[in-house]
Each structure stands twice: as C-alpha cells, then as structure tokens.
Image (cartoon, grey):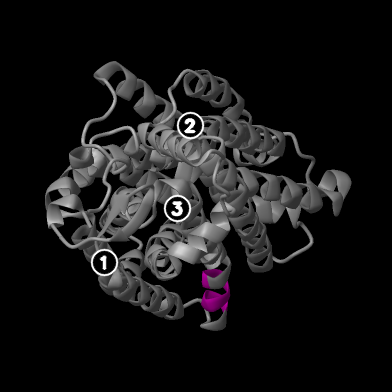
Amino acid sequence: MTDHRNSVPTDGLSGAAMRKVVAASFAGAMLEWYDFFVFGTASGLVFGRLFFAQSDPMMGIIAAFATFGVGFFARPIGGIVFGHFGDRVGRKVTLIWTLLIVGLSTFLIGLLPTYDEVGVLAPILLVLLRIVQGFGLGGEYGGAALMTIESSPQSRRGFMGSLPQAAASAGIMLATGVFSLCNWLLSESQFMLWGWRIPFLLSIVMLIVGMYIRVHVEETGDFQRAHRALARSADAEGERPKESLPIVELFRRHPKNILLALGARLAETVSSNAINAFGIAYISSQLGMGRQVPLTGMLIASAVGIVLCPVIGRLSDRWGQKPIYLAGAAFCAVFIFPFFNLLATKDIHVIWAALIVAYLMGPTSMFAVQPTMFSRMFGTRVRYTGLSFAYQFSAILGGLTPLIASSLLAMNGGRPWFVAGYLAAISTISFVCVCLIKPHQEIDGHAVPSVVGATSTGK
C-alpha cells in the first residue's frame, strides 16, 4: 500500500497566521513587481534619451529595451540559486534576501548619473544594476507564491495562490501611478532632469515596510512537513539520506513537466510585456499620443487586476486552473490583431478600453492561476526550484519581447502586424503545452501522476 503520510494535508494555518503570510507575500511581491515595472516604464519613456543620448529616437528606445531585457538573463540564474536555498534552507529566509537585493538595486538606479554627465559609464552602470535587480527577482516569484499556497488548505490553493499574483497588478498600478503623477505635476524639462528618479527612490520606503512584514512570518507548512519526513527517514536509517541538488532532482523526476511549464508560461510573459512595456512606447511614440494616455490606461487596468486576480483564483478552485489558463492563452492569440486596430483609432477611450481588456483577459487571467497550476506539477522538495526555473527561463523571451516587438515594428515600416503574428504564435504554443499537462498528486514530497483527474483540484 502506498504511504500517504507525507501527502499534503487539507488543513492550513490558523486565520491570524494565514493573514500574516498573505500580507508578507503580497507586500514583498508588490515591491518587487513595482521595481520591475518602474524599470519597464522608464525604458519606454526616458531611458533611451537619458542613457543612450547619441542614438536616434528609435534606436534609443531599442537600446533601452535591450537593457530592460538584460535583466531577464540574470533572472534564471537567480531562480536556480534562490530556488536551491528555498528548497534546502526555507522559503522565508530566501525571500528576505530577494526582497533586499531587488529593493536596493532599484533605489540605486534612481541615483545614477545620465549619459550627458558621465558618458558611456551611465549605460554601463544601468545595465549592471538591472542585472542585480533581475538576479534578485529571479527568486521572488516561486517563493512568494509558495508562501501562501503551501500554507493553505488544498481546497483554497487556487484563491490563496492568486493573492500574491494580485501584487503584480498592484505593482503596475503603483509604478504607472507614480510616473503619471510626476508627469502631470512636472514640466517636460523637470521630468527629464530629475522627476524620473522619484519612482525609483520611493522603492526604499516599500523595502523597509516589506522587510518588516516578511521577517515576522512562519515557514510554510509543506516545507516543514517535508523536512520532518526527511528527518524521520534519517532516524530510521541511522543517517541522513543523500540528496541530489534540487535542480538535478528536478530534471531527474520531472523532465516533461519542466518543458511543459516553460512552454505554458510563454503566452503570459510575452503578452504582458507586449501590452505593458512595448504598448506604452508604441502608443506614446509611434502613434504620437503622449505618455499620459497609455499610462492612464495601464493604471486603470492594473487597478481592476488587483480585484480580478483573487476572483479568478476563487473560480479556479471550482473549475480548475487549467481551463482558465487555456482561455487566457486562446484570448491572447485571437485578440492581438483587433488590439492593434483599436489602438490605431487614436481615440483615447478606445485605447484605454483596448489596454484594459487585453491586459485583464490575457496575461492577468493566466497569471492569477499560474503558480497553483505549476506548483501541482512538482513535489515539495524541488517545488521552489521548479517554479523558479520554469518562470524565469521563460521570462527571458518575455523580457526580450519589447526589443523584439520594436525591431519587428521597424522591419515592417511602423506597422504592428509582425508583432501581432509573433504574439499569436507564442500564445498558440502555450495553449498546446497546457493541453498536455496531466494531473499530479504529491506522495512523500514528490509529485507523481494522479489516478484521478478531478477538475476541482485545478489539475
């Protein structure tokens, strides 16, 4: 008979402890997503002019988006490093380090000299800090999601896993809100001279708050149970069993699931960056609508996303994460062509509606259920590494999307149809990968194929 002693129990933390875990995950994730989107927004609005001043406007934007993409190459390294410590040492202590690294690197970007002040040293420093930021962010996604998922009952893991995801919308709203406020209050010369620094410098306040909250939470229940099981095994055998590195164990036990998770993630990360970072630059520069129009649209979209994420998470506990993710990927593949047609109207309200619908129905719906769906594909002992690896390696393509999209736009004479085709193809790949994901259950800390495929479990 199979031993289910170490299967994930259906009970979670007490109400007060769970609220503290949710607050810690949300606050930390919001700061790190704020830092991430502040950089993306600045890349589309100011970095091309301030740090790549000798380039023509289009080449300046492309260079700025290349810097934006550089951070995504550091994220997989951070995902492997912090995934290792998250699976071996614990989720809590690892997340404290990721928060500190990302917060400080973002703050320092706000202090950087520009190209006019120090020449080529300016973009070099910007790239270095972007790499550090990406390294820290590489360990955030897996840990923040697992803090809530692994501390909650199985029947509510879709909802609980969506709460840190809502922090992404909160981060976008805060980042675009601060940029919008600075853009509104300051003149063009003031904004370009020093106003752009304000969003970066404000990250230090959120870093202090986030660190305080995150230090005062408990380790997750699943992690504690997995390590107690390992200790019992060591007591029974007289010595602690040898363990492979989490990344080695991950590929040994879950090679197919890693590939499927990587493919499934592409639609969400590519569409998010296409709508947000590239979309802001496209609307403001290519369509000549100015900065405020796309910033306001994304501000509204992200505000709604904060509320919508938990709603989608709650629905996924009833319907399953897989059907919702499939719907989001299909939407991205189909809506991207009408999306650019709507933007081409140059009607402010139509542009806002296009941004809101595209962002919420596409990447937000997938993002809300993503960690819960992915976490059920890997066992506790390699789960942090599995989520981080799948998320961060696929994020490379997402991070390069503004650069790729800008290049495709230039290749097609400013017409967006190459960009639309690119996103449609990526979304189709993700749709197929999600279709191939099979239900799993956890036994003795490892995920194995399940004999039951109940949709209510979200598998």
The residue positioned 64% from the left and 65% from the top of the image is 62
Q: CA distance from mark 3 to mark 1?
A: 16 Å
Q: CA distance from mark 2 to mark 3?
A: 17 Å
Check disc 2 and give the amino acid type.
Gly
Residue 131 in view: yes
Q: Which residue is mark 1?
A: 438
Q: What residue do we see at 48% from left, 34% from top?
A: 235
Can residue 352 be seen at all in this image of the molecule? no
Main SS, magenta region, reads helix
Q: Secondary structure at mark 3?
A: helix
Q: Earlier in the sequence, mark 3 or mark 1?
A: 3
Q: Quadrant of residue 172?
A: top left
Q: Earlier in the sequence, mark 2 or mark 3?
A: 2
The reply to whether dot 2 and dot 1 touch (C-beta < 8 Å) is no
What's drawn in magenta, residue-wise?
405-410
Badge 3 vs badge 1, beta-carbon distance below 8 Å = no
Residue located beneath label 2 in the image: 28
Q: Residue at x 14, y 57 (%)?
A: 455
Identify residue type, mark 3: Leu
Marks 2 and 1, the one that precedes in the sequence: 2
Position in image of residue 17 (x %, y %): 33, 19
Q: Measured along the vertical axis of the image, is residue 243 above or below residue 109?
A: below
Give the amino acid at mark 1. Answer: Lys
Residue 143, given in percent of the width and then of the height, sits at 47, 40
> Where's residue 363, x and y in %?
34, 57
Disc 2 is placed on an element classified as helix
Q: CA distance from mark 2 to mark 1?
A: 32 Å
Left or right of 421 in this view: 242: right
93 is within the stretch colored magenta = no
